Amino acid sequence: MPSVLSNDDLLCNDADTLILQNIELVDIFSRKFALLQPLAFHRFPNESLIYHGYLGCSPLHPTVAISLCMLAAYRQSHRTCPWFSIQVQCKALCHLHNIPYQPYLNMQFLDAYDVYLEILHRVDSLIKAALKCDTQDWCLLNSCPCCCYKLDDEDDMTFEWLATIDGNNSLKRWSSSIYGTSPRDDLWTQCSDYWLHCTKVDQFQLNGAQPHVISNQQDPTDDWEDVVQSDSAPFNCIDHWRNAGPEACKCMFSVFEESGIFIVACRHWFILLVCDMVKSGEFSKYPLATLDHLLNVYGKNGGVAYNISCAFSKTLENSCLGPRTCELNL
């Protein structure tokens, strides 16, 4: 029985349709219009474009294509500097090519860049599957050979694993509804097992203790102050550390959809886990969620460093993880 072809299949199997006439090819230092002939086995226009080193800005009828070298260069630039946006990249290309900037250029570049990232992700997934590196928590168990791998007949250590945790508020993203406009939900999800999903983090929303209040009322934003040590009044770093301050000092984070990231790293500086801090400061749910995952994967006899461990140790003791941390000797 003959197969039924869709309109798209009929369109893409037409040889005349696959010929890319007068298509605009954009590279870092060049911009030209060209005629590209498809090969015999090409079924879609973007197959011909990728064969020539470009990626179209639309799936079936591309009129503009971005070079793979340009997309790769922007990916590395954006990884190095997350503030280097697509709009900035498009404006830079306009200056290099001596053309006026138009806002629609952002969408053209964005469409091609999204497809480029999806291609990289799928290729990477196939490679990991072939190498048997796609099992659950593979990155956490293999990121650092020094920490994760053990030799035969190796003696037990006092600390079987060590990690450090902390939050960073440099990677902020404004909420889309902050200017009174309709909120735009971000439907993208992380494709790496480095990331803890927000739903898992929110499970510890109500498990933490109440935040500590800074006793220094004159300057609640001051990190340090001179304290006279005495036997009757032992030094308490909780009262003098900004990160353990009251939540009133952190309410500004509500204007950000993402106020930063909370990371876990081993003692050799390899990243183990990452989670987004959403519309909040460094709440206790973030270290609680990361510690829960570390205990599930690494198990007993671990050690974790935290810059507000004095305050957080009480929160951890009063949380649902308290009995487990004692049992696993954290």
Image (cartoon, rainbow, N blue to C red):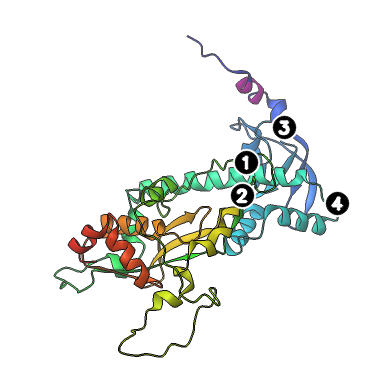
Q: Amino acid at mark 3?
A: Ile
Q: Which mark is residue 20?
A: none
Identify the residue at image location x=31%, y=87%: 232
Q: Secondary structure at mark 1?
A: loop
Q: Are marks 2 and 3 in contact (CB under 8 Å)?
A: no
Confirm whether residue 177 shows in the render.
Answer: yes
In the rendered image, is residue 256 in sight? Answer: no
* Side of 298 relative to 23 (left or right): left
Label 4, label 3: how far apart the Cα atoms are? 29 Å
Quarter holding the C terminus is bottom left
Q: Position of residue 231 (x, y in %)?
A: 30, 89
161 is higher (above) or lower (below) than 55: below
Any mark on residue 175, and which? 2
Q: Marks 2/1: CA distance? A: 8 Å
Q: Magenta residues: mostly which secondary structure?
A: helix
Comparing marks 4 and 1, which lies closer to the viewer? 1
| Residue for badge 4 | 100
x, y percentage for residue 4?
54, 13
The span picked out in magenta is: 8-12
Residue highlighted by disc 3: 19
Badge 1 density bin: few <14, some 14–19, many ≥20, Cα 10 Å: few
- Disc number lying in front (3 or 1): 1
Q: Nearer the viewer, residue 99 or 54?
A: 99
Mark 1 highlights which residue? Answer: 183
**Does the magenta segment cover residue 239?**
no
Query: What is the crowding at mark 3: few (fewer than 14 residues within 10 Å), some, or many (at least 20)?
Result: some
Q: Judge from the rendering whether residue 80 lies leftward or rightward of residue 328; answer left or right.
A: right
Q: Nearer the viewer, residue 180 or 87?
A: 180
Q: Which residue is outermost to the top?
A: 1
